[in-house]
Amino acid sequence: MLLRRTGAAGAAAATAGVSLWEAIGGSDPAPAAIGKRRAPSPSSIVQIVAHPDDDLYFINPLAWQDLTDSASLATVYLSAGESDGRNISIRTSGRHAVPADFPRYVEARRNGIRAAYSLMATGRDDSPWQVSAVRLGSALVVEKSVLKAEPDIALYFVGTRLGGKLRADEAGDPTVSSLRTLWSGRAAAQQTQPAATSPAAKAQRVGREELITALVMLLQQRKPTLVRLLDPDPDLVAGSSVHYSDHPDHTASAEFGIAALGRYSVACDTVPAVEHFRGYSNAWWPKNLSPDSYHHKSSALLVYGGSGRPDCYATMCGDLELGEDDQIQYGFSTWRRYPRAAGWLSVQADGTLAAVGTLGGQVVSWRGGLGGASPWSTAETIGTQGYVAPAVSTVRGPDGQLTLLALRRTTTLGSDPVVEVVWSAQRGGSLAFSEWRSLGAPTADPVRARETGIPVGAFDTRGVLSVFVRDDRRGVSVIQRSPAGAWGAWHPVTVPSPCQDGLAVLARSSGVVEAYAPSSRGVVRIQQSKAGAGDFTARKVIGAAPPASPLTAVESVDGRAVLVYRPPRSADIAVCTEANGSSRWTTATVAGAGGIGPVGIAPWRVGPSSGSLLYLMGEDGGLVTAPTVEPGALGAGRSAAPAWRKVDGPPLAGAASAIQTAQGTIAAACLGNDGRLWTAVQRIDRLADGFTAWTSTA
């Protein structure tokens, strides 16, 4: 019976600016019923994805955090996502007997995503929208939806249509026309698929240059402080040279976003921070959302999928192909494609602090006073002649000089990108660095090289710098620089289980360097045989639970290695400590504060006293800190909950960083969703007082 209902008038009302509730005979909620948000945030966020629901699956709950923070938020959907035109659950028997109706299915997906954003912003899924047709660039007309209760929330639908049967391979099929082939140049133009009641009712042909220009114009209008994109270089499926772990259009949306961001950043006054998110490969790794985070994510997905409403087929209220199933494996996680280690804040040789990050795909640095004292300098660009992944590693040498490690991506339209590890060394006591030089990738195959992870490194006591990356084998490779400055070749390390990105590196007091890699089966430890040596062995860390975050590694006062990370499906923190005289490690669980991403720990030692500061992204996306005992004393079993303290600042774009200074303070820094560096200090002898007032630097 549901399949024979039409309800076109109700759908027209829903997209014309009245609520879905009104469309089925209800009344619009009174203004008092709309959830109150805080004062407007300085953050302006733009998300560029392929399909309506990519943001719900791969970026949320972060978008929900933005809306709670009252940030300005715009999401751009490049593809119509019309599938086979049947808005029926994929689990329905006889589904293919239902006639295809592409405009209505596209309409249903757009109504579903509007309802999900309404829920996140106002607490109700039926807050009305104003829908209009707007021109971006010289010719392209797109559908724009603005939430009436929150006009800073906008959704843009470009709606390119798939032509032919899409395959998840890079080579593709010349008979297929998709967002992927549009990016690669194999298709000169892509036709749009208008929704049933869209004001942008006319199908258009969109070229690659036209789409990039439209995205640049949208960035100019929104002036983002943070841009979120999907994964431009997903893993290949194991054993295949052409099949990828992600949807080809997800990849293409990231490519278009990077191209538009590059053009925009050249001319804009304020360059935004950038984040990338994994897609379908989320299903391969431990689930990293706490129960509360997953509840928020799944509730928005259920609204998008129709939320069990029996009238949804008629009113086109959501994506019924999804059905009522929010249990799809990649929905349990939100993984950043380029995980940023917590050690990007450094004490320089003269005692001043340096923070290194990225804005708009370029490396930037900030300099603070002694002990992290304000004011900090404004951001200075360290140009890289390419797009740099938003995770730069900083390595302090024996002389106090800094070496930077990054992953650079160089793209020429119409050809495959070149992905390589690059490095730059500090010159003198200022934040002046040498030109960036390439270390290539662990594999000579340029397609495989795209799977290279974020480099991390450390010096041993012989002055040898060892750099580690997660490689295309899902193992770990290492390259070394001699004390004289000569680089060797990449060498693979045989690991006991497949690894993911988010490596930690540790310079041991014994003189050697170690790296730790997260695995779906636990943690892999990679050990140098002796200082100055080039041979490394890998073993499983006995007793370590699988990590659901990047790793952080530090040493205890008595010289034992300590790992901190998030365990799967938990708001807690796992602490694994090396046991004296045994290959087995002890495991402790510390009550955490929710959120996603790495857990940082800043050990401190003043005379006979020692302790540490834990810090992480909390459930609302902001920085949360807690003073606690020194890492080796966190013990086994479940420890008492530390005194977590929320920092008064914006949600984070990536990981924060904290470090002990010579002035008896702990300094901390974070890059906010507002695109600014935020810094603060606290005295070690008064940790209970918390940090001084946080200040921001452009």
Image (cartoon, rainbow, N blue to C red):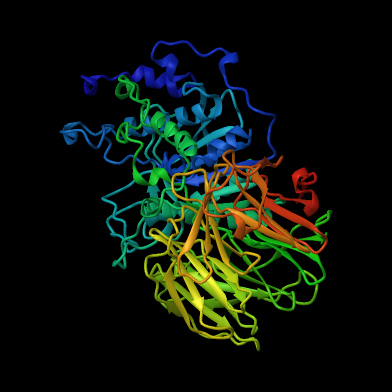
Vertical placement of residue 579 versus 303, above or below:
below
Residue 500: x percent and y percent?
44, 62
The answer to whether residue 189 is seen in the rendering is no
Give the quadrant of residue 438.
bottom right
In this rendered view, identify the residue nearer to me: 666 or 346: 666
Vertical placement of residue 684 versus 450, above or below:
above
Give the quadrant of residue 486.
bottom right
Vertical placement of residue 249 versus 318, above or below:
below
Give the quadrant of residue 341.
bottom right
In the picture, measured across the screen, residue 141 lies left or right of residue 649, that is: left
In this rendered view, identify the residue nearer to me: 244 or 502: 502
In the picture, measured across the screen, residue 387 lies left or right of residue 60, that is: right
Figure disc tally: 0
In the picture, measured across the screen, residue 459 lies left or right of residue 322, that is: right
Residue depicted at x 45% and y 78%: 537
The answer to whether residue 276 is seen in the rendering is yes
**Quarter occupied by the N terminus:** top left
Residue 392: x percent and y percent?
61, 64
Residue 620: x percent and y percent?
59, 38
In this rendered view, identify the residue nearer to me: 527 or 466: 527
Residue 192: x percent and y percent?
39, 42
Residue depicted at x 40% and y 67%: 474
